[in-house]
Amino acid sequence: GPIGHIAKALIFEDILFVFDSHYARKIFAYDLKNNGRFLYSLGKKGKGPGEFMHIKDFAIDSLNRQILLIDFPQRRISWFDMEGNFLYNKTLDFFPIKIYCDSECIYIQKEAEKDEFSLFVMDKNLKVISKHLPFSIYPSYINFDSGFQKVDGKLLLNFPLCDTIFQLKGPDIFPYLAINNDKYSFYSCVKKNKIESSFELSKFFNRYATQSNSNFEDIIFPNIYFEDDKLKFFRFSFNQKWYTFIKLYNKIPILGTLYNDFFYSILELSTSDEKYGTVGIINIQSILNADIELAKENKHLISEELMHFIQHPDPNSNPFIIFLK
């Protein structure tokens, strides 16, 4: 079936694995050596061997050349070989959410309740080696996304409702990087453990008006964290506003906050000391129905180039970004 929502993509050797978590609810395999030719899919509906009620995540065991799939409702992990053949499955005594597999351990993020742990480190036979992130300090909710990533040999975990990125080493876990908003963050380990580095964002947040909400005030909801040898990228929500934090190598950090308008979005960029600039993100189809006069009345920043495009739109053009200020 067609892919409707790409939740995860992994490449192993010359195979691209694409996970559609919402529509097809399958994992599709493509041959990169042969122009992306479709190979097979995993995720047949059912309760039998190699079948699934709802795939939640998958991982690659590169050492054994196997694919591991989580079936959340059945609390089950299934193993497949690289040709898509079912090998075996094992049932857990908890509901798994996320999975990562390295040469020694399998890391499983689970749905936790009071007095339970949210992260299990297990061996290849699913024997528990260690447990981390107790629910009483780090509550885990299934509807908040997080994930594992391997960066320059480091395994990192972006955990739900937490302002800290963790590093995993074998059975141990360490705080790796923290977002510090100059207050006690919700279920944060910043005040309790030593971290390698932190981003001081209190000056950034003071620049933006925030909506007060007694249930979610001063809570950081992590969305995407990415790091390589050139930049750090962290998208998160704070006090009901979305922020994007970008730190280029040896450069001043930049924080952006997004405001949505009827036919385009405005992204305000700031450094800790001053406003950096404004970017308009334009959607072509929305421009075709735009109310230009209303935008002028609201004193939105519209450059001559943008105004010309709005008045003479090209429906075949892609959405584009234009610097407004």
Image (cartoon, helix red, strand yellow):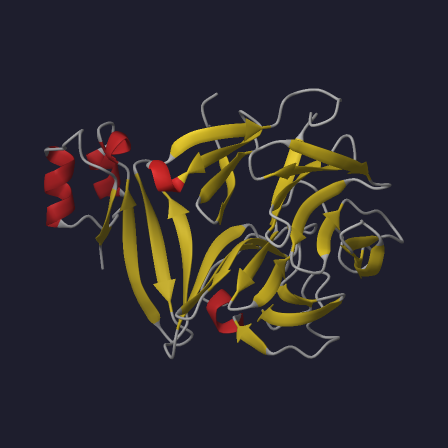
Instruction: Please state the horizontal and vertical placement of residue 231, each as a whole percent of the image.
Output: 41, 68
- The answer to whether 192 appears left or right of 308 in the picture is right
**In the picture, which quadrant includes the C terminus?**
bottom left
In the rendered view, would you say 129 is above or below 40?
below
The residue under the point 75% across, 75% down is: 192
Please name the residue shown 75% across and 22% down the image: 48
Q: Is residue 104 visible?
A: yes
Q: Position of residue 220 (x, y in %)?
A: 61, 58
**Quarter of image, res 120:** bottom right
Q: Is residue 224 above or below residue 205?
A: above
**From the viewer's perspective, is 86 left or right of 14?**
right
Residue 6 shown left or right of residue 181 in the figure:
left
Seen from the viewer's position, the closer of residues 15 and 92 is 15
x 34%, y 68%: residue: 275
Above/below status of 64 relative to 253? above
Q: Residue 285 is drawn in which quadrant?
A: top left
Q: How many marks?
A: 0
Instruction: Determine which quarter of the picture holds residue 239.
Output: bottom right
Q: Position of residue 42 (x, y in %)?
A: 59, 29
Name the foreground residue: 265 vs 18: 18
Question: What residue is at 69 percent from the left and 52 percent from the top?
Answer: 214
Q: Nearer the viewer, residue 4 or 61?
A: 61
Q: Is residue 160 visible?
A: no
Q: Position of residue 175 (x, y in %)?
A: 67, 71
Q: Is residue 89 above or below residue 49?
A: below
